[in-house]
Image: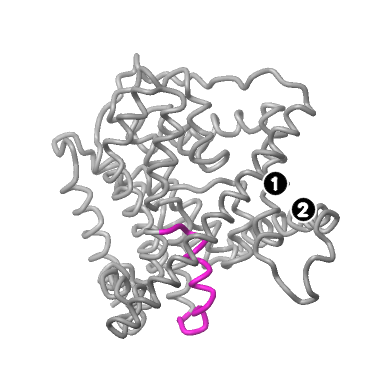
């Protein structure tokens, strides 16, 4: 039965992307099918095999150790502010982003990260049928973040036609930054975070291939990665520390506002009609949860968390999930967890459009015009990842 529902889900996702496609005649289904098969194999490897368990445990152990190092700095500055046994979200989950950001800066400074991103991007371009720039951008987005990635391709930004720009932006919204992966791992199981990272990478290409098909001329298939401004090692360290702290503070501010706003809206709805706002969203998104393989008995609750992520952000949704996680079966919990690991939400439209506009006024306006279509495509990527996980769990 679960395989029939998964097939239905795949058909719905590809069908919706097809309906929104800007050029149905150019769609190449062979790369799409190959990448779906790759997704299933990778999900099975990571979630159902001993090798996958060892790999995920290894990655989780690395991030756990990094979080321990980060905790040394946090405790030195903020030690004694919390009661014993307390778990302040800002101190324990968000502030470690500062240390992870520094590590990314060091890898960038010594050209290790650009080498890895170019290498993986080149391999991916052989599979997805897209250009080198698109493949590099998808990998770079997962490494350095959805806004920072555009700085690395700024030399080509002005020359990009809208259809290629859409693919770049969709990849940025479908993935997550490596700097906050550690924060996610404190909220949901690491194996689902790792699985989502891999699936979303291919999922972005799959949806873009259908919703935004095109061919890149070999003469135009050029990758020019901009070098960062020459800085001394300690200048770079200082900059990445401040950037990481800004991210932590921005996420904290967004959480503070959104969590309070949702609590207020839920209370108003409960007083007015006896049902919370999130429950209403749950009923709206229940069909989406069902085609992802979630049983109808859990679909409404799952749909509410999925909708929360869309209208707020993934951190708010993960907090909501942690409150009701015990009421879900392990399979449902896995599907929702993978769905939540992406930047697909309304606020990301402004973040990406702003990042591009800061580098190119003209291209920033182009991104703003296809903002909703961008969110639609990125959300389909998250749904597709959830469906793939439902097949192997």
Identity of the residue drawn at 63% across and 43% down: 246
The residue stretch that appears in magenta: 312-329
**Mark 2 touching mark 1, by CB under 8 A?**
yes
Kindly state the secondary structure of the residue where label 1 is placed.
helix
Residue 46: which numbered mark, if any?
Answer: none
Residue 216, placed above or below residue 5: above
The location of residue 13, given as percent across then percent down, is: 25, 56
Residue 189, placed above or below residue 208: below
> Is residue 195 shown in magenta?
no
Which residue is the site of mark 1? 98
Q: Earlier in the sequence, mark 2 or mark 1?
A: 2
In the displayed structure image, the side of residue 295 where residue 178 appears, left or right: right
Say few, some or many: other residues with alpha carbon within 10 Å of mark 1 (under 14 / 14 to 19 / 20 or more).
many
The location of residue 291, given as percent across then percent down, is: 28, 69
Kindly state the secondary structure of the residue where label 2 is placed.
helix
Identity of the residue drawn at 54% across and 59% down: 193
Identity of the residue drawn at 45% across and 75% down: 331
Q: How many marks?
A: 2
Say few, some or many: other residues with alpha carbon within 10 Å of mark 2 (under 14 / 14 to 19 / 20 or more).
some
Which residue is the site of mark 2? 70
Q: Residue furthest top?
A: 219
Asked if residue 107 shows in the view, the reply is yes
Identity of the residue drawn at 53% across and 69% down: 319
The location of residue 115, given as percent across then percent down, is: 61, 29
């Amino acid at each position: 039965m679960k395989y029939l529902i998964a097939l239905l889900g795949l058909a719905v996702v590809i069908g919706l992307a097809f309906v929104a496609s800007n050029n149905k005649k150019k769609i190449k289904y062979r790369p799409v099918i190959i990448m779906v098969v790759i997704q299933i194999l990778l999900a099975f490897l990571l979630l159902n095999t001993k090798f996958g368990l060892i790999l995920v445990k290894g990655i989780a152990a690395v991030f756990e150790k990094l979080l321990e190092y980060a905790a040394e700095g946090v405790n030195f500055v903020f030690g004694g502010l919390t009661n014993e046994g307390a778990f302040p979200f800002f101190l324990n989950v968000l502030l470690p982003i500062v240390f992870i950001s520094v590590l990314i800066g060091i890898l960038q400074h010594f050209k290790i990260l650009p080498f890895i991103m170019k290498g993986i991007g080149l391999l991916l371009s052989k599979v997805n049928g897209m250009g080198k720039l698109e493949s590099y951008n998808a990998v770079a987005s997962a490494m350095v973040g959805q806004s920072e990635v555009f700085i690395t391709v700024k030399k080509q930004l002005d020359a990009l036609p809208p259809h290629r720009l859409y693919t770049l932006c969709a990849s940025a919204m479908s993935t997550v930054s490596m700097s906050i992966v550690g924060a996610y791992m404190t909220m949901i199981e690491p194996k689902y975070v790792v699985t989502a990272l891999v699936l979303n990478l291919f999922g972005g290409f799959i949806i873009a291939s259908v919703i935004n098909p095109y061919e890149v001329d070999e003469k135009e298939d050029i990758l020019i990665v901009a070098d960062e401004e020459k800085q001394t090692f300690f200048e770079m360290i200082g900059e990445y520390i401040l950037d990481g702290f800004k991210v932590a503070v921005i996420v904290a501010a967004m959480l503070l506002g959104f969590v309070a706003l949702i609590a207020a809206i839920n209370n108003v709805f409960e007083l007015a009609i006896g049902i919370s706002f999130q429950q209403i969203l749950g009923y709206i998104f229940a069909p989406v949860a069902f085609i992802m393989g979630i049983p109808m008995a859990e679909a409404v609750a799952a749909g509410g968390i999925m909708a929360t992520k869309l209208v707020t952000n993934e951190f708010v949704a993960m907090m909501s999930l942690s409150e009701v996680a015990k009421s879900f079966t392990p399979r449902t919990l896995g599907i929702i967890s993978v769905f939540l690991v992406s930047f697909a939400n309304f606020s990301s439209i402004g973040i990406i459009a702003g990042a591009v506009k800061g580098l190119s006024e003209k291209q920033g306006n182009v991104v703003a015009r296809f903002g909703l279509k961008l969110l639609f495509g990125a959300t389909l990527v998250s749904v597709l990842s959830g469906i793939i996980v439902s097949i192997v769990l």
